[in-house]
């Protein structure tokens, strides 16, 4: 992969700004939780660099303080972050073509990075692979910065951050609307919405995600050619 151009870095940064606005605050919340549990900012840094699992990192604080077994932690991680297995299916060919960045792109594919990459429209004069890598790297850095910042400043934060995590939900809503408007084929989105709602009622809010993603993935894989799914 050729040398990164400044215009590409600037473009990638602009695409990552919505994620930055959410990750900084959510990272701070994680850092605060980790500090309250008795762990220093170095733990926040190492967790965010090496694990980088969003919601799983919040659960990790409970696991660390509860002294659970490695098997229990592994099962919990699978249930919480197993959805990433499905996300990766739609990007596996693209990531494989990115050479040395392939392992990092797999590691860094969070919900929000996935959403940004799905809606990414790169100008013809720019390299989409380099920009995709920079977006993933920027998002990762935002989470690290937020986590460390939260752990460092700790009790100095006096404002109420309740509701800040809704910025991530808002990001998904905006991206879904843009995808709907740009695409002529709406059946995949409708199938996803219907199955998601049905699984929500059947399995409950805590357990519906993996069954819903499994069913949607199977349907979309089966109908990929007939529905012209990219």
Image: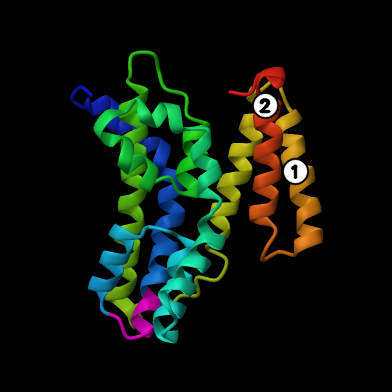
Pick the residue in front: 188 or 180.
188
Pick the residue in front: 56 or 103.
103
The disc at residue 193 is 1
Mark 1 lies on a secondary structure that is helix
Magenta stretch: includes residue 153: no
Q: Specify the principal SS of the magenta part.
A: helix
The residue shown at (45%, 60%) is 54
Residue 74 makes an appearance in the image: yes
Disc 2 crowd, CA 10 A, few/some/many (<14, 14-19, 20+): few
Disc 1 crowd, CA 10 A, few/some/many (<14, 14-19, 20+): few
Q: Residue furthest top?
A: 124
Residue 4 is situated, as x and y percent measured from the top left of the image, at 22, 27
The residue shown at (56%, 46%) is 171
The disc at residue 171 is none
Magenta residue span? 32-39
Pick the residue in front: 64 or 184.
64
Which picture quadrant has residue 186? top right
The disc at residue 181 is 2
- Position of residue 182 relative to residue 110, above or below, is above
The Cα atoms of the two marked residues, 1 and 2, are separated by 16 Å
Magenta stretch: includes residue 35: yes
């Amino acid at each position: 992969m050729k040398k990164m151009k400044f215009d590409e870095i600037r473009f990638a940064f602009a695409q990552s700004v919505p994620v930055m606005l959410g990750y900084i605050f959510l990272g701070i919340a994680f850092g605060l939780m980790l500090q309250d549990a008795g762990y220093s900012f170095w733990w926040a840094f190492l967790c965010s660099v090496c694990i980088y699992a969003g919601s799983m990192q919040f659960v990790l604080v409970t696991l660390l303080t509860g002294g659970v077994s490695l098997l229990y932690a592994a099962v919990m991680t699978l249930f919480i972050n197993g959805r990433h297995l499905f996300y990766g299916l739609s990007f596996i060919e693209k990531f494989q073509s990115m050479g040395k960045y392939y392992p990092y792109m797999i590691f860094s594919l969070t919900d929000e990075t996935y959403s940004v990459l799905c809606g990414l429209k790169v100008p013809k004069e720019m390299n989409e692979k380099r920009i995709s890598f920079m977006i993933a790297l920027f998002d990762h850095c935002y989470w690290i910065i937020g986590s460390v910042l939260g752990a460092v400043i700790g009790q100095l934060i006096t404002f109420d951050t309740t509701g800040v995590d809704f910025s991530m939900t808002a990001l998904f809503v905006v991206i879904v609307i843009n995808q709907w408007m740009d695409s002529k084929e709406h059946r995949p989105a409708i199938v996803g919405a219907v199955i998601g709602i049905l699984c929500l009622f059947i399995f409950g809010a805590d357990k519906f995600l993996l069954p819903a993603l499994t069913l949607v993935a199977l349907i979309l894989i089966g109908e990929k050619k007939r529905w012209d799914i990219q």
